Amino acid sequence: MHLPTVIMVALAINFIVGVYLYLLYRRKPKDRCFKLWSFSCVCFVLGSGLVVLRYYPFPEVLTFFIADSLLLLAPLYVLAGLVQFSRFRYTKRRRRQAFAALAFTLLVLLASYQQPGLISVAVALAIGITFCLCALLLQRSVITEPSFSRTLQIVFIVHALVMFGQAALIMFNWQQLNMHGLPETSIYTLLSHILLTTFTALLLPWLSFLKLERKLTLRSQRDGLTRLANREHFFNQIERYWQQHPSIPAVLMMIDIDFFKGVNDTFGHAVGDRAIALVAKLLSKQLRSNDIIGRIGGEEYAALLIDIDEQTALRISERLCQQVAAQLQYIDDAKVELTISIGMVHVVPAQHKHTAAFKIADEALYASKQAGRNTVTLGKLNTV
């Protein structure tokens, strides 16, 4: 294996991948991650190219400070691109903290660029920490494809360990450093760093493709008007709950907007659609994040309240009726005076089939309608 050839091939691949990522960004400008990752590839190639100039009489500020700053920017751009795929909230305060940390690191590099060993340790530690942050950010990713996420996470962690290992080698061999500020024994860590960077550059675009696949999957599972689970997905989730949590009690609710046909006939379908969406929004806000909510018909919803007793569920149902009546008297200046009716049943999945629970909850909803609407009825399942 001819080492210079391997390095040149790796750098060429990084450059080509960088160009490819930038072309993807031009094609899909909303995906800023492609632009950031293309910058990462370019920074790595330019930084590595400037490192090669250390063999020649070029200013140290160029071959050390600028070169190592570019090498540090490469993983930072990777980190910035990963934010798009995580549940991490990049607030103004965190942005200021990030820029302050970057400014401090660059000041350290500027102060130490005339000492090759010191700047090499600083850069290796900074790159290692950045890849640790990449792995942590990926842990909170919205991408649900575990094998790919785990593979990329392992690459980040291995890359961080390689950089920490390089820093340790420099410190242990402080008296035998070459003109690059590296011991001769670090050639393999350096090669590993180049190859891992290339492997990362090749893997990163898949994140965007997986995100697109996830978006399409969610679109097929969500109701277009309310963004709640559609009928098919809701029932699939209920069946899964019955299989996975047979001993955890739950309450199944059937919810219907009262006199909805009159709303459509009097105020038009646009107001009717707004009514459906606003009720869905209120349900999502009032119920817990782990409860399952879906729109299963025109103006009909269903919800599964997980791990809850009858009395608590009754109080929640009554509150839902009160909130709808109080908050949805007007829709777009139209006095609709919207109300809902609820039928519910308390069930332990191991004791009853979900089809039986739905039947009783639906009968309880009908009883609420017969009782005058804007009310809650608790149905009872026969004990097995």
Image (cartoon, grey):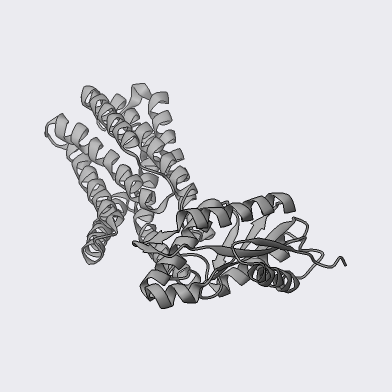
Specify whether 182 is left or right of 210: left
Nearer the observer, 145 or 62: 145
- Name the residue rendered at 48%, 48% in the picture: 140
Q: Is residue 277 above or below residue 43?
A: below
For the N terminus, the image quarter is bottom left
How many numbered marks appear?
0
x%, y% of residue 75? 33, 44
Q: Is residue 57 above or below residue 134?
A: above
x%, y% of residue 109? 25, 28
Nearer the observer, 376 or 219: 376
For the C terminus, the image quarter is bottom right
On the image, which quarter does residue 211 sit in?
Answer: bottom left
Q: In the displayed image of the protein, which residue is found farthest to the right?
A: 384
Q: Is residue 194 visible?
A: yes
x%, y% of residue 325? 51, 57
- Name the residue rendered at 44%, 45% in the picture: 137
Q: Is residue 309 visible?
A: no
Nearer the observer, 148 or 225: 225
Q: Is residue 202 above or below residue 270?
A: above
Nearer the observer, 132 or 31: 31
Q: Is residue 206 above or below residue 100?
A: below
x%, y% of residue 340? 56, 64
Specify whether 171 is left or right of 115: right
On the image, which quarter does residue 333 sit in?
Answer: bottom left
- Name the residue rendered at 60%, 56% in the picture: 291
- Name the residue rendered at 53%, 62% in the picture: 339
